[in-house]
Image (cartoon, rainbow, N blue to C red):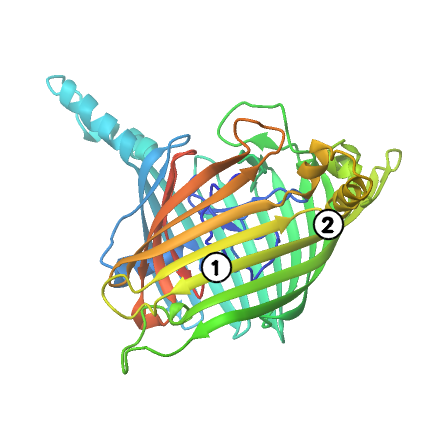
Amino acid sequence: MSLRRMRWMSVEDGRWELDAETPVTMEGTVRPVPGDPLPLGLSRGYRVTRPKQLDFFHRFMASPLVPTFSATRDGLSVNHAHILYITDNWSSTILEKINVNKLVSVVKEKFANRHEEASWTKDLKKHLHDVMSLGVGTEILITPDTTLLLELFDIKKGNRGKAIFHHELPHHNITFQASWPGLFVDKRGAYWDVPLSLSADLASVGSSSGLSYHLLLQQNSGEPKYFGGDKTDDVPIALLPGLCAKAAISIKKSIDAWRKKEDKLKNVQPYDIFLSDSHVSLTGIVGAVASGYLGDCSRRVAIRDETQKSNAFRMFDERNRCAAFADLFASVTFTAQYGNFQRLFLDLTRASARFDITSGSLFLCGASRLAQDFFFSRRPDVETFCDICPDVTVSLQQQILGPFSFRVESSVAIDPRSQDHFVRVDDPIFAIDWALKVLGSAKATAWYSPKHQEAIVELRFYEA
Protein backbone atom coordinates (compact mmCIF):
# COMPACT_ATOMS: atom_id res chain seq x y z
CA MET A 1 0.00 0.00 0.00
CA SER A 2 1.11 3.51 -0.69
CA LEU A 3 2.22 5.81 2.06
CA ARG A 4 2.71 8.85 -0.14
CA ARG A 5 1.44 11.25 2.47
CA MET A 6 2.98 11.28 5.91
CA ARG A 7 0.68 10.69 8.86
CA TRP A 8 2.50 9.31 11.87
CA MET A 9 0.98 6.25 13.40
CA SER A 10 -2.15 7.29 15.23
CA VAL A 11 -5.24 5.28 16.10
CA GLU A 12 -7.65 8.06 16.89
CA ASP A 13 -9.53 7.90 13.60
CA GLY A 14 -9.44 4.17 12.93
CA ARG A 15 -9.52 3.54 9.18
CA TRP A 16 -11.57 6.38 7.75
CA GLU A 17 -11.39 8.48 4.61
CA LEU A 18 -10.14 11.88 5.74
CA ASP A 19 -8.14 14.53 3.97
CA ALA A 20 -4.39 14.05 3.82
CA GLU A 21 -1.47 16.31 2.95
CA THR A 22 -0.04 16.26 -0.57
CA PRO A 23 2.50 18.48 -2.38
CA VAL A 24 0.97 18.09 -5.85
CA THR A 25 -1.59 20.93 -5.58
CA MET A 26 -1.73 24.38 -4.02
CA GLU A 27 -4.48 23.47 -1.56
CA GLY A 28 -2.30 20.65 -0.27
CA THR A 29 -5.07 18.11 0.39
CA VAL A 30 -6.29 14.88 -1.16
CA ARG A 31 -8.96 12.32 -0.26
CA PRO A 32 -8.74 8.53 -0.75
CA VAL A 33 -10.97 6.73 -3.23
CA PRO A 34 -14.23 5.71 -1.46
CA GLY A 35 -14.23 2.11 -0.36
CA ASP A 36 -10.56 1.37 -0.96
CA PRO A 37 -8.58 -0.17 1.91
CA LEU A 38 -6.96 2.89 3.39
CA PRO A 39 -3.20 3.29 3.36
CA LEU A 40 -2.19 4.22 6.88
CA GLY A 41 -0.44 7.36 5.68
CA LEU A 42 -3.66 8.80 4.33
CA SER A 43 -5.86 9.28 7.36
CA ARG A 44 -5.10 12.64 8.86
CA GLY A 45 -8.18 13.91 10.64
CA TYR A 46 -9.34 17.51 10.89
CA ARG A 47 -6.54 19.88 10.02
CA VAL A 48 -5.40 23.45 9.84
CA THR A 49 -5.90 24.73 6.29
CA ARG A 50 -2.82 25.07 4.12
CA PRO A 51 -2.95 28.92 3.97
CA LYS A 52 -3.10 29.08 7.78
CA GLN A 53 -0.17 26.69 8.04
CA LEU A 54 1.85 28.92 5.71
CA ASP A 55 0.84 32.02 7.66
CA PHE A 56 2.04 30.38 10.88
CA PHE A 57 5.41 29.56 9.28
CA HIS A 58 5.74 33.17 8.09
CA ARG A 59 4.82 34.80 11.39
CA PHE A 60 6.38 32.57 14.02
CA MET A 61 9.08 30.49 12.33
CA ALA A 62 10.83 33.08 10.15
CA SER A 63 9.98 31.18 6.96
CA PRO A 64 8.69 33.58 4.28
CA LEU A 65 8.85 30.80 1.67
CA VAL A 66 7.76 27.24 2.47
CA PRO A 67 9.01 24.54 0.07
CA THR A 68 7.24 21.54 -1.46
CA PHE A 69 8.56 18.97 -3.91
CA SER A 70 6.92 16.56 -6.34
CA ALA A 71 9.08 14.97 -9.02
CA THR A 72 6.05 13.88 -11.05
CA ARG A 73 4.53 17.39 -11.12
CA ASP A 74 6.32 20.73 -10.76
CA GLY A 75 9.55 19.67 -9.07
CA LEU A 76 10.63 22.13 -6.38
CA SER A 77 8.20 24.94 -5.50
CA VAL A 78 7.98 27.57 -2.77
CA ASN A 79 4.74 28.85 -1.24
CA HIS A 80 3.70 32.07 0.44
CA ALA A 81 0.37 33.18 1.92
CA HIS A 82 -1.07 36.59 2.81
CA ILE A 83 -3.96 36.54 5.31
CA LEU A 84 -5.98 39.72 5.78
CA TYR A 85 -8.25 39.81 8.83
CA ILE A 86 -11.13 42.02 7.71
CA THR A 87 -13.13 41.64 10.94
CA ASP A 88 -12.88 39.47 14.02
CA ASN A 89 -14.77 36.67 12.27
CA TRP A 90 -13.85 37.22 8.60
CA SER A 91 -10.51 36.73 6.86
CA SER A 92 -9.29 36.63 3.26
CA THR A 93 -6.26 34.84 1.83
CA ILE A 94 -3.98 35.24 -1.17
CA LEU A 95 -1.76 32.24 -1.86
CA GLU A 96 1.25 32.26 -4.18
CA LYS A 97 3.22 29.29 -5.48
CA ILE A 98 6.45 29.77 -7.41
CA ASN A 99 7.84 26.95 -9.51
CA VAL A 100 11.58 27.12 -8.83
CA ASN A 101 12.50 24.82 -11.72
CA LYS A 102 10.65 26.98 -14.26
CA LEU A 103 12.06 30.15 -12.71
CA VAL A 104 15.61 28.86 -13.10
CA SER A 105 14.88 27.89 -16.72
CA VAL A 106 13.55 31.36 -17.51
CA VAL A 107 16.60 33.05 -15.95
CA LYS A 108 18.97 30.76 -17.85
CA GLU A 109 17.12 31.47 -21.10
CA LYS A 110 17.31 35.21 -20.58
CA PHE A 111 21.02 35.14 -19.83
CA ALA A 112 21.63 32.96 -22.88
CA ASN A 113 19.74 35.48 -25.05
CA ARG A 114 20.92 38.59 -23.25
CA HIS A 115 22.33 40.09 -26.48
CA GLU A 116 18.93 40.06 -28.18
CA GLU A 117 16.75 43.14 -28.21
CA ALA A 118 13.81 41.52 -26.45
CA SER A 119 13.40 42.98 -22.97
CA TRP A 120 12.38 41.38 -19.70
CA THR A 121 9.27 43.54 -19.46
CA LYS A 122 7.99 42.43 -22.86
CA ASP A 123 7.64 38.82 -21.74
CA LEU A 124 7.02 39.54 -18.07
CA LYS A 125 3.34 38.59 -18.18
CA LYS A 126 4.10 35.30 -19.96
CA HIS A 127 6.88 34.43 -17.54
CA LEU A 128 4.76 35.21 -14.47
CA HIS A 129 1.99 32.99 -15.82
CA ASP A 130 4.44 30.11 -16.33
CA VAL A 131 6.33 30.50 -13.07
CA MET A 132 3.66 31.57 -10.57
CA SER A 133 0.30 30.13 -9.54
CA LEU A 134 -2.24 32.13 -7.56
CA GLY A 135 -4.99 31.17 -5.14
CA VAL A 136 -7.55 33.15 -3.15
CA GLY A 137 -9.85 32.24 -0.30
CA THR A 138 -12.08 33.59 2.41
CA GLU A 139 -13.13 32.14 5.76
CA ILE A 140 -16.13 33.29 7.76
CA LEU A 141 -16.71 32.35 11.39
CA ILE A 142 -20.52 32.41 11.33
CA THR A 143 -20.80 31.35 14.98
CA PRO A 144 -18.16 30.14 17.47
CA ASP A 145 -19.00 26.59 16.28
CA THR A 146 -19.70 27.20 12.58
CA THR A 147 -17.21 28.00 9.82
CA LEU A 148 -17.60 28.62 6.08
CA LEU A 149 -14.48 28.34 3.89
CA LEU A 150 -14.32 29.23 0.17
CA GLU A 151 -11.11 28.66 -1.82
CA LEU A 152 -10.03 28.99 -5.47
CA PHE A 153 -6.60 27.79 -6.59
CA ASP A 154 -4.55 27.76 -9.81
CA ILE A 155 -6.46 30.74 -11.16
CA LYS A 156 -6.39 30.92 -15.00
CA LYS A 157 -4.55 27.58 -15.08
CA GLY A 158 -6.70 24.87 -13.61
CA ASN A 159 -9.26 26.78 -11.55
CA ARG A 160 -9.52 24.33 -8.69
CA GLY A 161 -12.19 25.33 -6.18
CA LYS A 162 -13.46 24.17 -2.82
CA ALA A 163 -16.26 25.16 -0.42
CA ILE A 164 -16.42 23.73 3.12
CA PHE A 165 -19.10 24.25 5.76
CA HIS A 166 -18.05 22.90 9.17
CA HIS A 167 -20.19 22.85 12.31
CA GLU A 168 -19.36 21.49 15.75
CA LEU A 169 -22.20 19.81 17.60
CA PRO A 170 -21.99 18.38 21.13
CA HIS A 171 -19.59 15.42 20.76
CA HIS A 172 -19.98 15.52 16.95
CA ASN A 173 -18.57 17.25 13.88
CA ILE A 174 -20.56 17.78 10.70
CA THR A 175 -18.95 18.85 7.44
CA PHE A 176 -20.38 19.66 4.01
CA GLN A 177 -17.86 19.98 1.18
CA ALA A 178 -17.95 20.72 -2.54
CA SER A 179 -14.82 20.42 -4.71
CA TRP A 180 -14.43 21.20 -8.40
CA PRO A 181 -12.56 19.17 -9.31
CA GLY A 182 -12.20 16.80 -6.37
CA LEU A 183 -8.72 15.30 -5.99
CA PHE A 184 -8.55 11.62 -4.98
CA VAL A 185 -5.77 9.08 -4.56
CA ASP A 186 -6.17 5.34 -5.03
CA LYS A 187 -4.53 2.55 -3.03
CA ARG A 188 -1.61 2.45 -5.49
CA GLY A 189 -0.89 6.15 -4.99
CA ALA A 190 -2.19 7.48 -8.34
CA TYR A 191 -4.05 10.82 -8.31
CA TRP A 192 -7.44 11.32 -9.99
CA ASP A 193 -9.57 14.40 -10.65
CA VAL A 194 -13.38 14.19 -10.45
CA PRO A 195 -15.09 17.19 -12.13
CA LEU A 196 -17.48 17.73 -9.21
CA SER A 197 -17.47 16.03 -5.82
CA LEU A 198 -20.02 16.71 -3.07
CA SER A 199 -19.90 15.19 0.42
CA ALA A 200 -21.62 15.31 3.79
CA ASP A 201 -19.77 13.93 6.80
CA LEU A 202 -20.90 13.31 10.39
CA ALA A 203 -18.43 12.00 12.97
CA SER A 204 -18.49 11.41 16.71
CA VAL A 205 -15.60 13.08 18.56
CA GLY A 206 -14.27 13.59 22.06
CA SER A 207 -13.80 9.98 23.14
CA SER A 208 -10.31 8.46 23.19
CA SER A 209 -11.78 5.06 24.10
CA GLY A 210 -15.14 3.38 23.76
CA LEU A 211 -17.72 3.63 21.00
CA SER A 212 -17.40 5.91 17.97
CA TYR A 213 -19.16 6.15 14.61
CA HIS A 214 -18.91 7.92 11.29
CA LEU A 215 -21.38 8.61 8.47
CA LEU A 216 -20.60 9.80 4.94
CA LEU A 217 -22.57 10.69 1.82
CA GLN A 218 -20.58 11.37 -1.35
CA GLN A 219 -21.80 12.31 -4.82
CA ASN A 220 -19.42 12.33 -7.79
CA SER A 221 -20.34 13.83 -11.15
CA GLY A 222 -18.47 13.68 -14.44
CA GLU A 223 -15.83 11.32 -15.76
CA PRO A 224 -12.70 11.04 -13.58
CA LYS A 225 -9.38 11.93 -15.20
CA TYR A 226 -5.84 10.99 -14.30
CA PHE A 227 -4.28 13.99 -12.56
CA GLY A 228 -1.42 15.48 -14.54
CA GLY A 229 -1.56 13.24 -17.59
CA ASP A 230 -3.56 11.55 -20.33
CA LYS A 231 -3.87 8.16 -18.66
CA THR A 232 -7.38 6.78 -19.16
CA ASP A 233 -7.09 3.11 -18.13
CA ASP A 234 -7.47 1.71 -14.61
CA VAL A 235 -9.91 4.42 -13.54
CA PRO A 236 -11.15 3.57 -10.02
CA ILE A 237 -14.74 2.43 -10.43
CA ALA A 238 -15.71 4.03 -7.11
CA LEU A 239 -14.98 7.45 -8.67
CA LEU A 240 -17.44 6.99 -11.53
CA PRO A 241 -20.61 9.12 -11.39
CA GLY A 242 -22.96 8.10 -8.63
CA LEU A 243 -23.83 8.31 -4.94
CA CYS A 244 -21.94 6.50 -2.17
CA ALA A 245 -23.25 6.19 1.38
CA LYS A 246 -20.98 4.80 4.07
CA ALA A 247 -21.37 4.13 7.79
CA ALA A 248 -18.79 2.82 10.24
CA ILE A 249 -18.95 2.00 13.92
CA SER A 250 -16.05 0.90 16.10
CA ILE A 251 -15.02 0.19 19.66
CA LYS A 252 -11.59 1.22 20.88
CA LYS A 253 -9.70 0.11 23.98
CA SER A 254 -6.24 1.20 25.17
CA ILE A 255 -4.20 -0.61 27.82
CA ASP A 256 -0.97 0.52 29.46
CA ALA A 257 1.24 -2.48 30.13
CA TRP A 258 3.77 -0.17 31.80
CA ARG A 259 3.98 3.58 32.35
CA LYS A 260 6.65 5.46 34.29
CA LYS A 261 5.93 8.98 35.48
CA GLU A 262 8.98 9.31 37.72
CA ASP A 263 12.41 10.70 36.79
CA LYS A 264 10.94 13.79 35.17
CA LEU A 265 12.82 17.06 35.51
CA LYS A 266 11.00 19.36 37.88
CA ASN A 267 9.71 22.68 36.53
CA VAL A 268 10.78 21.73 32.99
CA GLN A 269 8.05 21.53 30.37
CA PRO A 270 8.46 18.67 27.89
CA TYR A 271 8.80 19.56 24.23
CA ASP A 272 5.53 17.69 23.61
CA ILE A 273 3.10 16.95 26.44
CA PHE A 274 1.84 13.83 24.65
CA LEU A 275 5.36 12.38 24.59
CA SER A 276 6.31 13.00 28.21
CA ASP A 277 5.99 9.50 29.75
CA SER A 278 7.99 6.33 29.22
CA HIS A 279 5.48 3.57 28.55
CA VAL A 280 4.49 0.40 26.78
CA SER A 281 0.90 0.33 25.56
CA LEU A 282 -1.52 -1.66 23.44
CA THR A 283 -4.50 -0.23 21.56
CA GLY A 284 -7.16 -2.24 19.79
CA ILE A 285 -10.01 -1.24 17.49
CA VAL A 286 -12.82 -3.52 16.30
CA GLY A 287 -15.57 -2.28 14.04
CA ALA A 288 -17.92 -2.75 11.13
CA VAL A 289 -18.44 -0.75 7.96
CA ALA A 290 -21.36 -0.75 5.51
CA SER A 291 -21.50 0.96 2.12
CA GLY A 292 -24.26 1.56 -0.40
CA TYR A 293 -23.77 2.64 -4.03
CA LEU A 294 -26.17 4.06 -6.59
CA GLY A 295 -25.10 4.78 -10.17
CA ASP A 296 -22.08 3.74 -12.23
CA CYS A 297 -19.92 3.52 -9.09
CA SER A 298 -22.00 0.53 -7.93
CA ARG A 299 -20.04 -1.73 -10.31
CA ARG A 300 -17.21 -1.68 -7.80
CA VAL A 301 -18.99 -4.29 -5.68
CA ALA A 302 -19.18 -6.67 -8.65
CA ILE A 303 -15.42 -6.60 -9.28
CA ARG A 304 -13.72 -9.87 -8.40
CA ASP A 305 -11.11 -9.41 -5.67
CA GLU A 306 -9.81 -11.25 -2.63
CA THR A 307 -12.82 -10.24 -0.51
CA GLN A 308 -15.00 -12.45 -2.73
CA LYS A 309 -13.51 -15.41 -0.86
CA SER A 310 -14.90 -14.10 2.43
CA ASN A 311 -18.38 -14.13 3.90
CA ALA A 312 -18.74 -10.35 3.65
CA PHE A 313 -22.24 -9.22 2.75
CA ARG A 314 -22.49 -7.96 -0.81
CA MET A 315 -25.34 -7.24 -3.19
CA PHE A 316 -25.26 -5.93 -6.76
CA ASP A 317 -28.23 -5.10 -9.00
CA GLU A 318 -26.88 -4.39 -12.46
CA ARG A 319 -30.26 -3.43 -13.88
CA ASN A 320 -30.96 -0.72 -11.30
CA ARG A 321 -27.26 0.15 -10.89
CA CYS A 322 -27.23 -0.19 -7.11
CA ALA A 323 -25.09 -2.19 -4.70
CA ALA A 324 -24.42 -2.76 -1.02
CA PHE A 325 -21.44 -4.07 0.92
CA ALA A 326 -20.69 -4.72 4.61
CA ASP A 327 -17.69 -6.14 6.44
CA LEU A 328 -15.74 -6.11 9.70
CA PHE A 329 -12.34 -4.56 10.36
CA ALA A 330 -9.84 -4.54 13.22
CA SER A 331 -6.58 -2.91 14.18
CA VAL A 332 -4.00 -3.50 16.90
CA THR A 333 -1.18 -1.07 17.73
CA PHE A 334 1.81 -1.71 19.98
CA THR A 335 3.72 1.37 21.19
CA ALA A 336 6.88 1.57 23.31
CA GLN A 337 8.54 4.80 24.43
CA TYR A 338 11.58 5.51 26.56
CA GLY A 339 12.35 9.04 27.72
CA ASN A 340 10.40 12.12 28.75
CA PHE A 341 11.36 14.50 25.89
CA GLN A 342 12.63 17.12 28.35
CA ARG A 343 16.40 16.96 28.06
CA LEU A 344 18.55 18.22 25.19
CA PHE A 345 19.94 14.88 24.02
CA LEU A 346 18.50 11.40 23.43
CA ASP A 347 15.56 11.77 25.80
CA LEU A 348 13.01 10.25 23.43
CA THR A 349 13.06 6.86 21.72
CA ARG A 350 9.70 5.68 20.42
CA ALA A 351 8.68 2.67 18.34
CA SER A 352 5.27 1.57 17.10
CA ALA A 353 3.87 -1.32 15.12
CA ARG A 354 0.35 -1.39 13.75
CA PHE A 355 -1.47 -4.46 12.41
CA ASP A 356 -4.57 -3.77 10.31
CA ILE A 357 -7.15 -6.34 9.26
CA THR A 358 -9.05 -4.63 6.46
CA SER A 359 -11.53 -7.45 5.93
CA GLY A 360 -12.62 -9.15 9.11
CA SER A 361 -14.74 -11.74 7.29
CA LEU A 362 -11.79 -12.76 5.08
CA PHE A 363 -9.57 -13.06 8.15
CA LEU A 364 -12.13 -15.21 10.01
CA CYS A 365 -12.60 -17.49 6.99
CA GLY A 366 -8.84 -17.90 6.63
CA ALA A 367 -8.36 -18.53 10.35
CA SER A 368 -11.16 -21.11 10.31
CA ARG A 369 -9.64 -22.98 7.35
CA LEU A 370 -6.21 -22.87 8.96
CA ALA A 371 -7.57 -24.29 12.22
CA GLN A 372 -9.26 -27.13 10.32
CA ASP A 373 -6.03 -27.91 8.46
CA PHE A 374 -4.11 -28.17 11.73
CA PHE A 375 -6.86 -30.20 13.39
CA PHE A 376 -6.98 -32.75 10.55
CA SER A 377 -3.18 -32.68 10.10
CA ARG A 378 -3.43 -31.30 6.58
CA ARG A 379 -0.79 -29.12 4.97
CA PRO A 380 -2.10 -25.53 5.08
CA ASP A 381 -2.61 -23.74 1.79
CA VAL A 382 -0.34 -20.74 1.14
CA GLU A 383 -3.36 -18.67 0.10
CA THR A 384 -4.87 -19.28 3.53
CA PHE A 385 -1.80 -17.73 5.16
CA CYS A 386 -2.17 -14.73 2.83
CA ASP A 387 -5.80 -14.29 3.92
CA ILE A 388 -4.84 -13.91 7.58
CA CYS A 389 -1.74 -11.75 7.08
CA PRO A 390 -2.51 -8.21 8.31
CA ASP A 391 -1.28 -4.95 6.82
CA VAL A 392 1.72 -3.98 8.95
CA THR A 393 3.18 -0.52 9.49
CA VAL A 394 6.15 0.26 11.71
CA SER A 395 7.39 3.62 12.97
CA LEU A 396 10.53 4.75 14.79
CA GLN A 397 11.23 8.16 16.32
CA GLN A 398 14.48 9.35 17.91
CA GLN A 399 15.26 12.71 19.46
CA ILE A 400 18.33 14.31 17.90
CA LEU A 401 18.79 17.63 19.70
CA GLY A 402 16.35 19.66 21.76
CA PRO A 403 12.98 19.89 19.98
CA PHE A 404 14.29 18.14 16.84
CA SER A 405 13.67 14.46 16.26
CA PHE A 406 14.02 12.06 13.36
CA ARG A 407 11.24 9.75 12.23
CA VAL A 408 10.94 6.91 9.78
CA GLU A 409 7.74 5.08 8.93
CA SER A 410 7.17 2.25 6.51
CA SER A 411 4.70 -0.44 5.62
CA VAL A 412 5.95 -4.01 5.88
CA ALA A 413 4.65 -6.40 3.24
CA ILE A 414 4.21 -10.05 4.30
CA ASP A 415 3.80 -12.42 1.34
CA PRO A 416 4.08 -16.16 2.07
CA ARG A 417 3.87 -16.83 -1.69
CA SER A 418 7.23 -15.16 -2.30
CA GLN A 419 10.24 -17.32 -1.46
CA ASP A 420 12.76 -14.53 -2.00
CA HIS A 421 10.97 -11.71 -0.19
CA PHE A 422 8.73 -13.24 2.44
CA VAL A 423 8.95 -9.97 4.39
CA ARG A 424 9.96 -6.72 2.72
CA VAL A 425 10.02 -3.04 3.65
CA ASP A 426 7.80 -1.00 1.36
CA ASP A 427 7.40 2.77 0.90
CA PRO A 428 9.62 4.17 3.66
CA ILE A 429 9.10 7.82 4.55
CA PHE A 430 11.68 9.93 6.39
CA ALA A 431 11.03 13.12 8.32
CA ILE A 432 12.39 15.69 10.73
CA ASP A 433 10.04 16.96 13.45
CA TRP A 434 10.43 20.32 15.18
CA ALA A 435 8.35 20.24 18.37
CA LEU A 436 6.82 23.64 19.16
CA LYS A 437 7.13 23.59 22.93
CA VAL A 438 5.23 26.81 23.54
CA LEU A 439 2.04 25.28 22.07
CA GLY A 440 2.07 22.19 24.28
CA SER A 441 1.70 19.62 21.51
CA ALA A 442 2.44 20.85 18.00
CA LYS A 443 5.17 20.30 15.45
CA ALA A 444 6.47 21.41 12.13
CA THR A 445 7.19 18.33 10.04
CA ALA A 446 9.30 18.05 6.92
CA TRP A 447 8.89 14.64 5.29
CA TYR A 448 10.19 12.97 2.15
CA SER A 449 9.15 9.83 0.28
CA PRO A 450 12.11 8.45 -1.73
CA LYS A 451 9.96 5.95 -3.64
CA HIS A 452 7.49 8.54 -4.94
CA GLN A 453 9.87 11.52 -4.71
CA GLU A 454 7.49 13.80 -2.83
CA ALA A 455 8.22 16.15 0.05
CA ILE A 456 6.33 18.78 2.00
CA VAL A 457 6.68 20.92 5.11
CA GLU A 458 3.52 21.01 7.19
CA LEU A 459 2.15 21.94 10.61
CA ARG A 460 0.44 19.48 12.94
CA PHE A 461 -1.30 19.82 16.28
CA TYR A 462 -2.10 17.30 19.02
CA GLU A 463 -0.73 14.30 17.17
CA ALA A 464 1.41 11.80 19.03
Q: Is residue 202 visible?
A: yes
Would you identify the image quadrant in which residue 436 lies?
bottom left
> CA gap, disc 1 to disc 2?
30 Å
- Drawn side of residue 106 relative to residue 365, left or right: left
Pointer 1 with pointer 2, Cβ within 8 A: no
Earlier-in-chain disc, 1 versus 2: 1
Q: Which residue is mark 2?
A: 360
Q: Position of residue 346 (x, y in %)?
A: 27, 61
Instruction: Report the residue that reaches farthest toward the left.
Output: 115
Say which amino acid is labelled 2: Gly
**Residue in the image at 33% along x and 56% along y:** 398
**Residue in the image at 79% along x and 46% along y:** 368
Q: Position of residue 399 (x, y in %)?
A: 30, 58
Q: Residues within 10 Å of mark 2 (few under 14, many from 20)?
A: many
Label number found at residue 47: 1
In this orientation, which residue lies closer to the viewer: 409 or 176? 409
In this orientation, which residue lies closer to the viewer: 369 or 304? 369
